[in-house]
Image: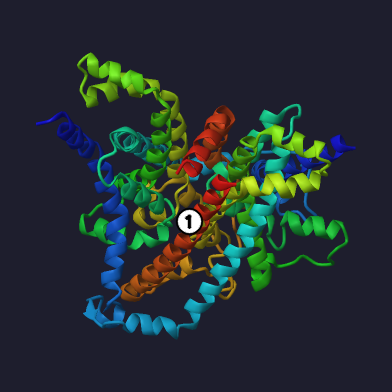
Amino acid sequence: MKNILLWGAIAFVVAFCLAPVMWQILTSFKFNQDIAAVPTVYFPTRITLNHYIELFNRRPFWNYILNSAFVSIVSTALSLALGAPAAYTLARLRPRGSRLILAGILMVTLFPGILLFFGLLEIIQRLHLGNNYLALIIPYTAINLPLTILVLRSFFEQLPKDLEDAARVDGYNTLQMLLQILLPMTIPALVTTGILTFIFAWNEFIFALTFMTREDMKTIPVAAAQLGGASVFEIPYGSIAAATIVGTLPLVLLVLFFQRKIIQGLTAGAVKG
Amino acid sequence: MTIRNREQRTAWLFLLPALLLLLFVFGYPIARAFWLSLFTQNLGTKLQPVFSGVDNYIRMAGDGRFWQSFWTTIGLTVTTVSLELLLGLSIALVLNQRFFGRGVVRTIAILPWALPTALIGLAWAWIFHDQFGVVNDILLRLGLIRTGINWLGEPTLALIAVIFADVWKTTPFVSILLLAGLQSISPDLYEAHVIDGATPWQSFYQITLPLLMPQILIAMLFRFAQTFGVFDLIMVMTGGGPGGATEVVSLYIYSTVMRYLDFGYGAALVVVTFLLLITSVAIASFLLQKSRTSLGSS
């Protein structure tokens, strides 16, 4: 009896989480006639790759993917580069004011982008950074910094202190110690954090929508949201579905390979703070 | 220079780049909004800032559209966060059981959280489509409705659709946090409780819930702030429509700035939203501290 209940609940969780994605996948492979059929066709007798082909032929979709990838990878690398020393400082060196800084960092993780886009837009316009990768890389790096610092700090705190004492005796200064001894040991933590920041950057919408207006500079979420037909009456559902799948595929792969790390990072970031 | 001094200098060298960037991206825009909110800067002033004191705030007090968006945001936030806690806790309890294939199910269970919200919004808009949507088709086949429902075209229904999509997208985040909390509760506690003659329900209320309280509050805090500022999902699904029924504060701010070019007023809206968020977060953190200390003492 208990087993039946449990497996019922498991089946519900799986169906709940997968159904919308599955539906989008199915739609992306259907012919237009089947997409617009009433009643709905659940098991199409024929499938097509046309929506995917159109996506890449009619639109610079490779371009969107490259934009998303470039911005996400660079901002992830930057937030690790800036975040790791800061996290180490807050974990071990603890200068005066550390607690205040930490509280500020925690606070900042809760700020939604809508409160920032306006002030940033002014700066970007003044510096003529519109439609420039920097317009996304800088805010994405900053938005990912708090999480990076919080997660890495909790990992640094778990490292044995003897290691650092031994390094000091061997004449390493703090920077050398961090780069040559501690960072190689925290590679798992860096990967965990990097995956999370990559996901955030890939998914970001409001800055990408506001700061990138030129077609060839757009990122995937914005480009997909702006796919329209020739008229209001002709919305290309097939292409939209295909675009959703293309845009989510990299993240699905990340989740498949790094499920454990993602869970670890999220809980470390939220709970340890 | 003493070792202590040198270490302090290194510490600040390590911290400064990160802190400066955070100040630049988070501090400046907020400070700038406070300043700009004291000016009228819109098409009426040819986009030049004209000092107008608290005029923007007075205007906001009488702005029906602002209040509507405010209450929509509050309603949406309270509903989605409560639903997510309930559903998230249930899913976490399931994922905490031992069963064959648990790793795979956990992977599936975090998937919605990782996917881009804007793209998920598109998927849900298609699912709730009035003519070809699968929700209507299922309801029709079950004989629950006779004609397709215009989900995204009716104020209340559009709100329900948005809530549904948001709950789907962000419940995994809640489940992950709560699952971590569940895993940290020692099984011995339950065994001792069962020996004392407690039913599973009693164990849940007397052990699981109290010990899980810190995680529940943290999840609430994060989800509250995120839902309060939700933008992409609603922008993509309804654009704030129909007739402003799903226009939350963030969408109102966006169109005030980007469509009406009313920068001064937009800044005032940012300031008020910011203050509301900070106040709620402060209250929630206070509660969190309290629940942590009460746990520590018991």
Residue furthest toward the top?
A170
* Three-letter code, disc 1: Ser
The residue drawn where x is 27% and y is 77% is B38
* Above-or-below relation of B110 to B86: above
Q: How many marks?
A: 1
- Is A191 above or below relative to B152? above
B116 vs B31: above or below? above
- Of helix, strand and loop, which one carries label 1? helix
Residue A105 seen in the figure:
yes
Q: How is the image coloured?
A: rainbow
Determine whether, in the image, residue B199 is placed left or right of residue A270: right
Looking at the image, can residue B232 be seen?
Answer: no
Q: Is residue B115 above or below residue B249?
A: above
Which residue corresponds to the image point at 40% horizontal and 65% vertical from the top-left? Answer: B274
Q: Which residue is mark 1?
A: B285
Residue at 25%, 52% in the rendered image: A129
Camera-side residue of B35 and A227: B35
In the image, taking residue A145 as reference, residue A129 lies left or right, namely left
Q: In the displayed image of the protein, which residue is found farthest to the left?
A: B1
Question: What is the quadrant of the N terminus of chain B in the image?
Answer: top left
Q: Chain of mark 1?
A: B
Q: Position of residue B210 (x, y in %)?
A: 65, 49
Residue B170 spot, x, y in % from top left: 59, 50
Percent position (x, y) of residue B76? 59, 65
Query: Between residues B287 and B112, which one lies in front from this camera angle?
Result: B287
Report which quarter residue B141 is drawn in. Answer: bottom right
Q: Residue at x 36, y 55 (%)?
A: A213
